Amino acid sequence: MGILKLNFLKVFLLGSTLSLSLIYNYNCDFWIRKEYEYYQLFTVLLFAIVFFVLSREPLKFGKVDIAVISILIFLLLSRASRLISFNEIHVLNTASLIFYYISVKTIHFKKEDFITYYNFIIGIGFFLSVYSLFELSGYIPSPDYFWNMLGNFPNPAPLGGFIAVVLLLVFNELLQKEILKKHLKLIVYILIAIILLVVLIKSASRAAILSLIVSVLILLLLKGVIKWKNLRYIIFIGLPILCFVFFYKGTDSFYGRLLIWKISFISFFENPYAGIRYGFFGVDYLNFQANYFMNGGTNQEILLAGATEQTFNEFLKFVIENGILGILLVVGCCFWILKPNTDFCNYIKRNSSIVSFSLYSVILVFAQFSYPLQFLPFKLILLNQIGLQKYTPLLLNFTIKVNFQKILFCLMCCLLFFASNYQYKGFKAWKEASELQFSDPNLSNTLYVFASRRLEYEAAFLSHYANVIQEKTPQEALVYYEKAKGLASFSGLYRKTAQINENLGNYKSAEADYLKIHFISPHLFLPLEQLLDFYNRRGDKKKSNYYAKKILETSIKIPSAEVIRIKHKAKNQLDFY
C-alpha cells in the first residue's frame, strides 16, 4: 500500500513539473518571460532532487539511458565549447535536464501507474485547452496582438503540437476494451477529445494535425484495430486528405520551409565536423541567409525569406548545430542499442510500449515541420516517456550504496543550483538597474556593472546595456553590440552597430552592417532606404542611384503607405539625378 501511495506521489510530482513548465513556458512581457527561464530551471532541479530523495531502489541504467545521457552531455559541451564557458542559462538548462533524467530513472511504474500518469497529462491538456478557448473567445485577453489563442506558447503552432500529444493519449484510452463498460468514463473522454480537437483545429497547425493523423494510424496498427494488409488502401484514401491539410492555407509556408532547409543544408558544409554548436542555429541562420542572397536568389525566394530563427525541422537543426560528430554519436548509440541479443522486440510488444511508440511518432512527425524541442514541456514529456520504460540494466563491476548516491546527486544539483542562482541574481540586478535608470543613475550604473559580470553571455542584456551607454561611450557600446551579435541575431543589432560605426567614421563596417540588414530580408524596403540614405550621406551617387533603382524594381509583398513613400523617394532621386 505504501508503494502505491509513493508511486501516486511520483505521478503527481511528474504532472506538477509538467504543469509548471507550461505555466512558465512563455509570456509576452519581456521581464516576466526572462524570469520564467530561471523559474523553469529551478523547477526542474527541485523536482529532480525530490524524485531522487524519494527513491527506495538502486539506480539502474540500460543502454537507452546511457545513450540519452550521452547525447545530453554532448549537447551541453557543444554549446559550452563555442561560448568557452558554462556560465550561461541554456548550458545550465541542459545540465538540469541531465539530472532530471537521472532522477526519472529512479521511478519504477507498474501498468496502473502509467495509466494514472497518462490521465494526469490528459487532465493538463484539458485545462490548457479550456484556457486556450477562453483566450479565443476573449474572456481571457490574449497577450499577443497577432494571435487570439496562445496557451502560454509564443504562437498557436506549438500549442497545437502539444494538444496533438494529449489527443493521442485520449484516443489510446478510448481504444481500451473496458471503457465500453464504463459509460461515464467514455462520455468524459469523448467530450475531452472534442474540446481538444477544437483547439487543435483552431491552432491551424498543419504539422500538428499531420502528426496526430500519423500517430493515431500507428496506434491503430499496433493495437490490431487496422490490419497491416489494409494499410495501402488507407494511404491511397488518406493521401489526398493529407495534401489538403498541407495546402489548404496556401503554399507560402511550405515553400518557406523548403527555402530554410535549402539554405541550412548549404551552410552545413561551412562547419561540417562539429557544426555551429548546440542552440546557435537561431544566431547563425540569418548570416547564412544573408550570404545566400548576396550571391543570388530568385524573386520568389526573396519574397519568401523572413528573419526566422527556426529550422522547422529538429533533425536538420541537430545536424547543422552538431555536425558529423553529433551524427556519429546518434548513429553509434542506435547501433549499440539495436544490436542482436537485446530484448527490443519484446519491449515493443508490451502495451505500454505501443503507447510509447505512438507517442514518439507524434513528436517525431511534428518535429519534422516545427520546433517542439525548443520548449520545456515537450522535452519533459519525451524524457519522461523514455526514462520511465524498463530496459535491461547494464552489469557493472562495482556498486554504489543508495544513500551515497543520494548525497552525491544532491550535492551536484546544489552546485548547479548555485550556478543558476549566480545568474539569476545578475538578472535581478539588470531588471532593477533598468527601473532605476532615470530616478537613481548612480545606483543603476552600479547594478549594471554588477550584472555585466554575471550575464556576459546574455544577448538581451548586452544589447540593453549597450543602449544605455551608447550616447556617453559609443565605442564601449559597440563592443557590447558586437558581442551580442555572436549570441543572438536580429536586424536591430546590425542597425545599431551600423549607426555607431558610421558616427565613429568606420564606414566600411557601417556599409557591411547596412548590407547585412538588407540581405537578411531582401524583400523589405526600409533596409533599402537605409542603404540609399547612407550612400547619399557618403556622397556616393553611383551606389545610391543603384539602390534607388533596386527599390523601384523590388516586388511589393505587403502593400502599405510606407512602401509607397519609399518608392516615391527613390523615383524622385532618379528623376533629380
Image (spheres, rainbow, N blue to C red):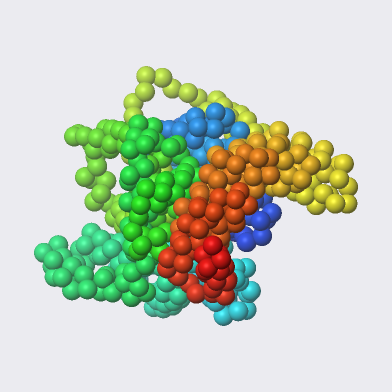
Q: Is residue 14 left or right of residue 313?
A: right
Q: How many marks?
A: 0
Q: Quadrant of the C terminus?
A: bottom right
Q: Residue at x 18, y 74 (%)?
A: 237
Q: Is residue 487 left or right of residue 338?
A: right
Q: Residue at x 18, y 68 (%)?
A: 235
Q: Position of residue 350 (x, y in %)?
A: 27, 51
Between 185 and 250, the one nearer to me in the picture? 250
Q: Looking at the image, is 272 positioned above or below residue 25?
A: above
Q: Quadrant of residue 355?
A: bottom left
Q: Looking at the image, is 478 positioned above or below residue 310?
A: above
Q: Quadrant of residue 27?
A: bottom right
Q: Residue at x 24, y 51 (%)?
A: 349
Q: Is residue 277 visible?
A: yes
Q: Position of residue 241 (x, y in %)?
A: 25, 74
Between 497 and 8, the one nearer to me in the picture? 497
Q: Extreme front residue here?
A: 577
Q: Position of residue 19 (x, y in %)?
A: 56, 57
Q: Is residue 570 left or right of residue 305?
A: right
Between 345 and 295, the one nearer to me in the picture? 295
Q: Residue at x 50, y 58 (%)?
A: 545
Q: Is residue 1 visible?
A: no
Q: Position of residue 475 (x, y in %)?
A: 70, 37
Q: Extreme left residue here?
A: 229
